[in-house]
Image (spheres, rainbow, N blue to C red):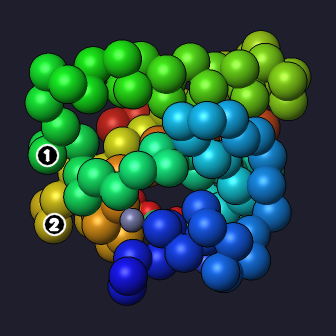
């Protein structure tokens, strides 16, 4: 098993846990781009959002719910971003589906 985020989910590589349940694990990004930068990943390996199907609909809803729950817990009521990079053109660098929850500062639009 060579996937970095699978290893993090299993605890083989250390991370700073933020939230976890039976379906997902959320941890601090190692190279934060905002005061709050958390990654929310499914426990089960999926390469990218592009590789999901109808059988993943409930899981995808759960991941967004978890990101928003973390945002509420961290007091991000002024606003935040939930970002999913998908594939090469979007700069996805880890091929295990993940949501970036970013907040704690104003953000520009559009992203680069
Ligand atoms: P992406 O570029 O959308 O694939 O995002 C991958 C994210 O994973 C980047 O923001 C990295 O900083 C983050 N990352 C890479 N390795 C680790 C790690 N060991 N622990 C936590 N975050 C990581
Ligand atoms: Zn994985």
Q: Residue at x 70, y 55 (%)?
A: 27
x and y, in percent, of residue 28 in the image = 72, 58
Nearer to me, 49 or 6: 6
Nearer to me, 28 or 55: 55
Q: Is residue 88 left or right of residue 34?
A: left
x and y, in percent, of residue 63 in the image = 49, 29
Q: Residue at x 36, y 17 (%)?
A: 58
**Residue wearing tag 2:** 88
Q: Are marks 2 and 1 in contact (CB under 8 Å)?
A: no
Determine the image quadrant of residue 111. top left
Q: Quadrant of the N terminus?
A: bottom left
Q: Residue at x 68, y 35 (%)?
A: 21
Element under disc 2: helix
Q: Residue at x 56, y 18 (%)?
A: 65
Checking the image for residue 65, the label placed there is none
Q: Earlier in the sequence, mark 2 or mark 1?
A: 1
x and y, in percent, of residue 24 in the image = 56, 40
Ligand 2 in which quarter: bottom left
**Residue wearing tag 1:** 51
Quick check: 59 above or below 11?
above
Q: Is residue 34 left or right of residue 46?
A: right
Q: Mark 2: give few (<14), some (14-19) or many (20+) Cα within 10 Å.
A: few
Q: Is residue 12 left or right of residue 93?
A: right
């Amino acid at each position: 098993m060579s996937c970095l985020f699978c290893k993090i989910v299993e605890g083989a590589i250390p991370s700073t846990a933020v939230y976890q349940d039976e379906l997902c694990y959320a941890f601090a990004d190692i190279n934060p781009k905002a005061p709050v930068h958390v990654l929310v990943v499914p426990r089960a390996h999926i390469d990218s959002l592009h590789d999901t199907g109808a059988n993943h609909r409930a899981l995808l809803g759960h991941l967004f719910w978890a990101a928003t729950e973390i945002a509420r817990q961290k007091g991000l009521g002024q606003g935040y971003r939930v970002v999913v990079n998908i594939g090469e053109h979007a700069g996805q660098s880890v091929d295990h589906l993940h949501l970036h929850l970013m907040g704690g500062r104003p953000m520009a639009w559009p992203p680069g």
